[in-house]
């Protein structure tokens, strides 16, 4: 079934069961509470990309306690953002969040803008994050397509087990077609479909017995045909440059003063890979080499 055909077969009646399920089963997460505000939503969205909720929670709490407003983060060194990011992975996100906080402070008086276009214009903010913040923080109508939502739509609407590796135009079109018309309901739908994918329609071992739309799910009704697309991307970590970068950064996060090359050399035996990883960190602005041959987290 193509996405176009699928949209014609999906009734708006999907909205009521999914939103109703969310109202009953949504997790009480700190960034969903009113006091989180738009900044809390933005911070959580940066952290949750590619990182599970249980790992994000402690870092989020620490982050918001230290930098409760964008201006607080903007006033601190980017290296402090990298340090507090800890072991969440993909630490360039910390630098991007710091850059966004600076732009919010300079351009918007310290308040996270509510307009999708202004959000998108912030450095480090892509289509997904702009839509998520506009929808979750400001209750606007946007298609919010994260991995979980894409999987739910692939199964329930398109009738396939997994979405393509990268988001396609057909998926965006489908997501727009499935959005409720009314703004507040669209925002609820975005949060609800994301939660459904995270808790019930998971990548492996989906629990259709708990699913509010099991009776309408195209993939389930078709007998759950096996995945036929290209192999899904693996999550290998051991032995990769990412692992080396993680170890090098851990040394710098734990250090209160700049560290010598020898301290970095001790964390990975293979010199070529180690040098490549360090060069990458420097090129990404995550590590600052000093004239005396020492290294530290970026201060400016
Ligand atoms: S019925 Fe199963 S496969 Fe279909 S959306 Fe629900 S949990 Fe996912």
Image: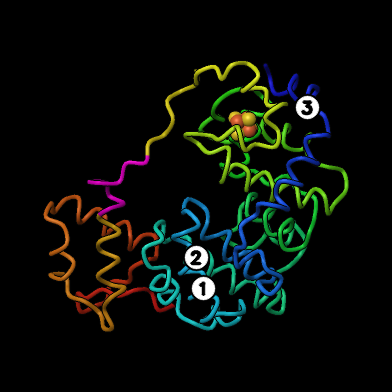
What's the CA distance linking mark 1 and mark 3?
Answer: 39 Å
Left/right placement of residue 89 relative to residue 73 reads left
Give the crowd class for mark 2: few <14, some 14-19, many >=20 residues within 10 Å.
some
Disc 2 target residue? 57
For residue 211, the mark is: none
- Residue 255 among magenta residues: no
Left/right placement of residue 65 relative to residue 158 reads left
Measured from the top left, where is residue 107 in percent x and y? 69, 74
Measured from the top left, where is residue 231 in percent x and y? 42, 25
Quarter of the displayed picture in which ligand 1 can be seen:
top right
Q: Nearer the viewer, residue 218 or 49?
A: 218
Left/right placement of residue 143 relative to residue 235 reads right
The span picked out in magenta is 235-243
Instruction: Tell me the residue at 73%/42% (across/down).
Output: 18
Q: Is residue 188 above or below residue 213?
A: below
Give the crowd class for mark 1: few <14, some 14-19, many >=20 residues within 10 Å.
some
Q: Nearer the viewer, residue 31 or 291?
A: 31
Q: Nearer the viewer, residue 58 or 290?
A: 58
Q: Is residue 80 above or below residue 238?
A: below
Which quadrant does the C terminus fall into?
bottom left
For residue 61, the mark is: 1
Magenta span dominant secondary structure: loop
Q: Secondary structure at mark 1?
A: helix
């Amino acid at each position: 079934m193509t996405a176009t055909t699928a949209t014609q077969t999906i009734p708006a009646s999907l909205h009521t069961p999914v939103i109703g399920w969310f109202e009953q089963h949504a997790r009480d997460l700190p960034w969903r509470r009113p006091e989180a505000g738009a900044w809390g939503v933005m911070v959580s969205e940066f952290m949750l990309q590619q990182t599970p909720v249980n790992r994000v929670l402690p870092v989020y709490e620490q982050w918001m306690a230290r930098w409760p407003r964008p201006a607080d983060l903007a006033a601190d060194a980017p290296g402090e953002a990298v340090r507090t990011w800890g072991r969440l992975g993909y630490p360039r996100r910390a630098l991007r969040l710091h850059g966004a906080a600076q732009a919010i402070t300079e351009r918007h008086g310290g308040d996270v803008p509510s307009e999708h276009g202004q959000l998108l214009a912030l450095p480090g903010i892509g289509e997904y994050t702009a839509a998520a913040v506009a929808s979750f923080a400001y209750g606007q109508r946007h298609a919010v397509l994260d991995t979980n939502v894409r999987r739910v739509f692939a199964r329930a609407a398109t009738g396939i087990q997994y979405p393509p590796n990268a988001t396609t135009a057909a998926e965006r079109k489908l997501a727009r077609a499935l959005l409720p018309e009314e703004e507040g309901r669209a925002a609820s739908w975005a949060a609800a479909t994301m939660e459904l994918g995270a808790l019930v329609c998971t990548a492996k071992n989906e629990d259709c017995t708990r699913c509010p739309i099991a009776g309408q799910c195209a993939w389930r009704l078709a007998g759950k045909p096996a995945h036929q697309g290209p192999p899904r991307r693996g999550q290998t970590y051991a032995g990769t440059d990412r692992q080396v970068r993680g170890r090098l950064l851990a040394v710098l996060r734990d250090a209160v003063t700049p560290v010598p090359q020898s301290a970095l050399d001790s964390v990975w035996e293979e010199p070529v890979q180690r040098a490549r990883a360090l060069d990458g960190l420097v090129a990404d602005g995550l590590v600052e080499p000093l004239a005396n041959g020492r290294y530290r987290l970026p201060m400016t």
